[in-house]
Image (cartoon, rainbow, N blue to C red):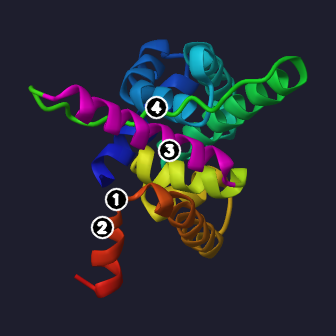
Amino acid sequence: MASEAATDATLVEAARNGDVASYGQLVKRYEAVAHRTAFALGAGDDTADVVQEAFVKAYLALGRFRVSEPFRPWLLKIVINETRNRWRWYSRHRTVPLPLVAQELASPVRTPEQVAEENERVRSLRDALAALPRHQRDVITCRYLLDLTEDETAQVLRIPNGTAKSRLSRGLTALQAMLRPTIAPEVVEAERRGV
């Protein structure tokens, strides 16, 4: 990880000095996580536009980037801000549902009943996540959908680590309460008995 951070710092320095190819390497390295972040936080069909705008803004702001800090959280802050800007624009112009996709490995043979049950679980999770306050939804998205560490989550959302932990805890508790009615009765009973 330290060598990757040093490599990012080297690429940033080169990009600051006019080496566009170095910035292209940073884009290639972080494009996938930027897309996942924008999509998971609600950019939907505009994900590619949001990410492109975020990379342009990051390039223009390289002079303000502290090379002693990791590049990824700094970039993801910009992606999150661009996604929120898009949400604000849509909230003034039209209603947009939260487009959250749960990605799981599909088994080769699934019955129609299994597919229907899986679709219902995904819908329930998506609806429950969308019902959370944005500050809790953002922390859960960063930690579990984007697989960021607690420190990265706090950095990306620009909140103290303790705040990130408490929002995560409260958000997971609220999700559990909302999803409990959708859990199979035998699972709830086993949980109650401590099995």
Kindly report which numbered mark, 4 or 2, lies closer to the viewer in this rendering.
Answer: 2
Indicate the position of residue 120 as horizontal and vertical percent values: 42, 38
Residue linked to disc 1: 184
Mark closer to the chain start, 4 or 2:
4
Q: Position of residue 152 (x, y in %)?
A: 50, 56
Q: Are marks 2 and 1 in contact (CB under 8 Å)?
A: yes
Q: Answer yes or no: do the residues labelled 1 and 3 have beta carbons within 8 Å?
A: no
Q: Which residue is mark 4?
A: 36
Which residue lies under the disc numbered 2? 187
Task: Look at label 1 and name its amino acid.
Answer: Ala
C-alpha gap between disc 2 and disc 1: 5 Å
Tell me the quarter of the picture where residue 121 sits: top left
Q: Tell me the residue at 38%/21% (across/down).
A: 28
Circle 3 crowding by C-alpha within 10 Å: few under 14, some 14–19, many from 20: some
Q: How many marks?
A: 4
Which of disc 4 and disc 1 is earlier in sequence? 4
Task: Give the number of the disc on residue 124.
Answer: 3
Magenta highlight range: 110-132
Question: Under tag 4, what secondary structure?
Answer: helix
Whether the residues at callouts 3 and 4 have beta carbons within 8 Å, the answer is: no
Q: Secondary structure at mark 2?
A: helix
Left or right: where 86 falls relative to 155 = right
Observer able to see residue 13: no
Which marked residue is nearer to the observer: mark 3 or mark 4? 3
- Cα gap from disc 1 to disc 3, whole angstroms: 13 Å
Residue at the spot 55% in from the left edge and 70% down from the top edge = 173
